[in-house]
Every structure is written in structure tokens, then in C-alpha cells.
Amino acid sequence: MTSWIRASHLSAWAALIVAIFAGAVGCSRPDERTEPASAPRTESRVPSSSSKASSKPRIVILGDSLTAGLGLPIEEAYPALIQQRLNDRGLEYEVINGGVSGDTSAGGLSRVGWALQGDVRVLVVALGGNDALRGLPTEQLKTNLAAIIEEAQGSGIAVILAGMEAPPNYGREYQIAFHKVYPALARDYKVAFIPFLLQNVAGSTELNQQDGIHPTPEGARIVADNVWSVLEPLVERLSHTKVQSQK
């Protein structure tokens, strides 16, 4: 096995495969091998932002059920934990949870117009898990993610890309090709990069719910750590730049 793909990642995704065939991922269709990049997902819904209008600049996290916090109270999902950390540090940003269960990279692309509405300063792209579970073409994944990044950068929005890994059942060649998509995009577009969103969580029975896929509250805190380690310096830099420009 290539050194790019860690054994802990593989054991985690092996658990996902078991969950698929047990029906744990109800909206995933493993036999669906292609999906038009521009086609919106029929089961997707556009997540709503805070009911109260906010004048704060936004950080939008565009993702799937891992971001939505499936199986958790919304306040325990990792985007809410990121909001708490921003508040604790006096960083004036509003986090928008843009997670939709079952979404692939194509589904995320179909929602990017919504995601970039308002005063968005940072877009966290946390997609690809469902592409991997369905074995969708890695070229399609790369095209969709690239289009999302380009939309954000074209609007002057900073991007953080969160990496995912593919399960072993589609073969070593697919795993490697899937893995390579994320660092290649981060390099090509010069965006901040989280190598693996589920680092130190995937594969742990203690940190995942019974489905073996979605983090427990403790697991979500570790996912928040993974995101925060990249987001915090970016937000601090953006805030410093804003202060300097106002002088």
C-alpha cells in the first residue's frame, strides 16, 4: 500500500463499507457510478442559516452529513463547535453549517451559489465522502471541487479544502487516485488544506456512532480540532489584514 494512504484510514473506510451494505447510508447508492456535475441532488435541501440576521462576515462549511452533524444535536456538530471557538477568541464571524446528508461533490457544486451569498470570507469545502462510497470517477470529483474553489476565489473568498479518503472495496488504484485529488487541488489553487477531515476519528469505535461513520460528540470535537488548526491562522490573518486596511 502506498505511503500516501494510512492504515487507520483504510480500517475506517472498511467500516463504512459494512455500513453501506447494512443500509446505514440510506441516501447513498453504491451502484451509481456517474453523476452530472451540474445536476442538483433530488434529496438535497438547502440548509438555512441563523434565523436572526447577522452583520458578521461569514464562514461557510460546505459539506455532507459529517458537516450536518447527523445523529447529533446541531450544537454538537463540528461547525457549531467552531463557532464557539471563534466566539471565545473574540473573532467576529458567523459560521454557516452548509452540510446536507448524502451530498456528493456534484451536490455541493449545485449549492455553491447559495453558499457564497452574503458577506462570505471563508469557504470550507468538506465534500467527497459520498463520491468515495459510490465509487464515482475521481476525475469528476476533481472537476467538481475545482469548480467550487474557482467560484469562491472568483469572489475573493478564501478557501480551505478538507481531504477525504476512499474505501478499499474499489481497489488500490481507485484509492490512490482518489487520495491524490485533494493535495493536487490544494497545490494548484494555493488553498489552505486539511489532509484528512476525520484524522484521529475514523476507525475508532469510541469516537463514532453505531453506524461506524458519523462521529460522536467527542469525535466531533476532534474533527473541530482538525478544522480549527487550519482555520484559526487563516481567520487571524484575515482579521489582521482588515484592521491594517482600516488604519
Image (cartoon, helix red, strand yellow):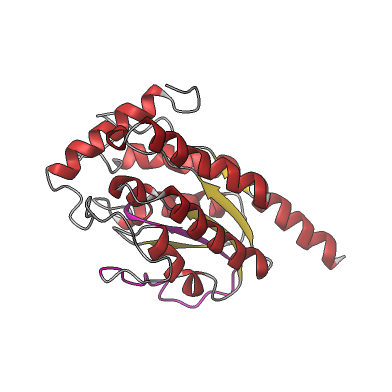
Residue 191 coordinates in the image, percent (x, y)? 64, 50
Residue 122 coordinates in the image, percent (x, y)? 60, 60
Find the residue positioned furthest to the left: 22
How many marks the image carries: the answer is 0
Q: Could you tell me which residue is drawn at 44 percent across and 49 percent down?
A: 81
Residue 136 coordinates in the image, percent (x, y)? 35, 51
Please check the rendered image and state whether residue 87 is part of the magenta-colored stretch, yes or no: no
Q: Could you tell me which residue is drawn at 34 percent across and 57 percent down?
A: 68
**In the image, residue 81 above or below residue 175:** below
**Residue nearest the viewer, comparing 131 with 207:** 131
Q: Is residue 3 left or right of residue 152?
A: left
**In the image, residue 74 above or below residue 176:** below
Q: Chief secondary structure of the magenta span?
A: loop
**Residue nearest the viewer, comparing 59 with 133:** 133
Please check the rendered image and state whether residue 44 is part of the magenta-colored stretch, yes or no: yes
Is residue 231 in view from this perspective?
A: no
Q: Is residue 87 left or right of residue 192?
A: left
Is residue 194 in view from this perspective?
A: yes
Q: Could you tell me which residue is drawn at 43 percent across and 71 percent down?
A: 38
Query: From the image, which quarter does the N terminus lie in?
Result: top left
Q: Give, as a single range, the part of the protein colored magenta.
A: 43-66
**In the image, residue 143 above or below residue 46:** above
Query: From the image, which quarter does the C terminus lie in?
Result: bottom right
**Residue nearest the viewer, comparing 138 with 236:** 138
